[in-house]
Image (cartoon, rainbow, N blue to C red):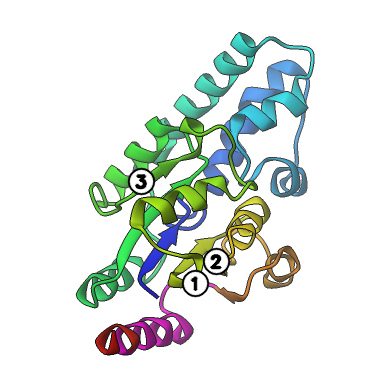
């Protein structure tokens, strides 16, 4: 293993409660009420473009963009108190110490990405930083993860993906990468059914430390 590739929302921090509230408030004027189950199955992990196509099939692209911009601005206003998932900073430090590359691959809009990274004191921590909105296809398509691998010059067997959503897990697996499911949003069973190889509740799990130690041993033999 030579790289760790992270999703943003629900993986670096538990952002889904804030996204749920922002979506619920933004949809209320349109007469659409959502519950947490709908959020998990129809919204979490998907791009705004895909969400708006489903919610407002007759609206124009400009209307979709205005809705998404307003919703994401509301999310950023609420996101100042976010904290990293337990063990994240220690895991990143441990990976860097072993020469393991660290990338970010996300469906989130660029403004959200930079804001959340700033709040979590992680600005500049990820290279590459792959934004699905800059690509022709977003998760669950494998293209975002394939793009990260190409930027790193690595094959799928040389990386590990961290994801909390079904589209994200599907994207990692479709790219042929070992995928760890984070149970911040969904159950371990749901993530495994989507294809996750391993599930953990946070980054302190011994399974992850074993992966890093194993990677260090392999690198020392290379």
Q: Residues within 10 Å of mark 3 (few under 14, many from 20)?
A: some
Describe residue 63's horizontal placement relative to residue 159 as left or right.
right
Foreground mark, 3 or 1, reads 1
**In what quadrant of the picture does the C terminus appear?**
bottom left
Describe residue 115's horizontal placement relative to residue 52 as left or right.
left
Relative to 128, residue 27 above or below: above
Foreground mark, 3 or 2, reads 2
The image shows residue 86 at horizontal and vertical percentages of 39, 69
Kindly check if marks 2 and 1 are in contact, taking CB atoms under 8 A apart as contact: yes
Q: Secondary structure at mark 2?
A: loop
Q: Residues within 10 Å of mark 2 (few under 14, many from 20)?
A: many
Q: In the rendered structure, which segment of residues is drawn in magenta? A: 201-217
Q: Which residue is mark 1?
A: 157
In space, the residues marked 2 and 1 are separated at their CA atoms by: 6 Å
Kindly check if marks 3 and 1 are in contact, taking CB atoms under 8 A apart as contact: no
Precedes in sequence: disc 2 or disc 1: 1
Describe residue 25's horizontal placement relative to residue 5 as left or right.
right
Residue 34, by quadrant, is: top right
Q: Which residue is mark 3?
A: 129
For residue 86, say whether it is visible: yes
Relative to 198, residue 108 above or below: above
Circle on res. 45: none
Instruction: Identify the residue at horizontal 27%, vertical 43% (top origin).
Output: 118
In space, the residues marked 3 and 2 are separated at their CA atoms by: 17 Å
Precedes in sequence: disc 3 or disc 2: 3
| Residue 202 lies in the magenta-colored region | yes
Q: Which residue is mark 2?
A: 177
* Of residues 163 and 144, the one drawn nearer to the viewer in this rendering: 144
| Residue 161 lies in the magenta-colored region | no
Relative to 109, residue 107 above or below: below
Instruction: Identify the residue at horizontal 62%, vertical 32% (top origin).
Output: 23
């Amino acid at each position: 293993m030579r790289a760790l590739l992270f999703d943003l929302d629900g993986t670096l921090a538990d952002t889904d409660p804030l996204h749920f509230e922002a979506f619920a408030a933004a949809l209320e004027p349109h007469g659409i009420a959502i519950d947490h189950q709908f959020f998990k199955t129809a919204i979490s992990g998907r791009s705004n473009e895909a969400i708006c196509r489903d919610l407002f099939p007759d609206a124009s692209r400009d209307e979709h963009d205005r809705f998404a911009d307003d919703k994401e601005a509301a999310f950023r206003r609420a996101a100042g108190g976010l904290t990293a998932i337990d063990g994240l900073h220690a895991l990143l430090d441990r990976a860097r110490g072993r020469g393991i590359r660290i990338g970010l691959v996300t469906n989130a809009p660029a403004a959200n990405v930079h804001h959340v990274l700033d709040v979590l004191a992680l600005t500049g921590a990820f290279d590459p930083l792959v934004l699905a909105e800059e690509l022709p296809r977003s998760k669950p398509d494998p293209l975002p993860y394939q793009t990260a691998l190409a930027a790193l010059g690595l094959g799928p067997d040389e990386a590990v993906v961290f994801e909390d959503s079904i589209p994200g897990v599907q994207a990692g697996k479709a790219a042929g990468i070992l995928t760890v499911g984070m149970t911040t949003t969904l159950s371990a069973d749901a993530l495994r059914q989507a294809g996750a190889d391993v599930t953990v509740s946070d980054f302190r799990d011994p399974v992850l430390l074993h992966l890093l130690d194993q990677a260090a041993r392999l690198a020392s033999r290379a």
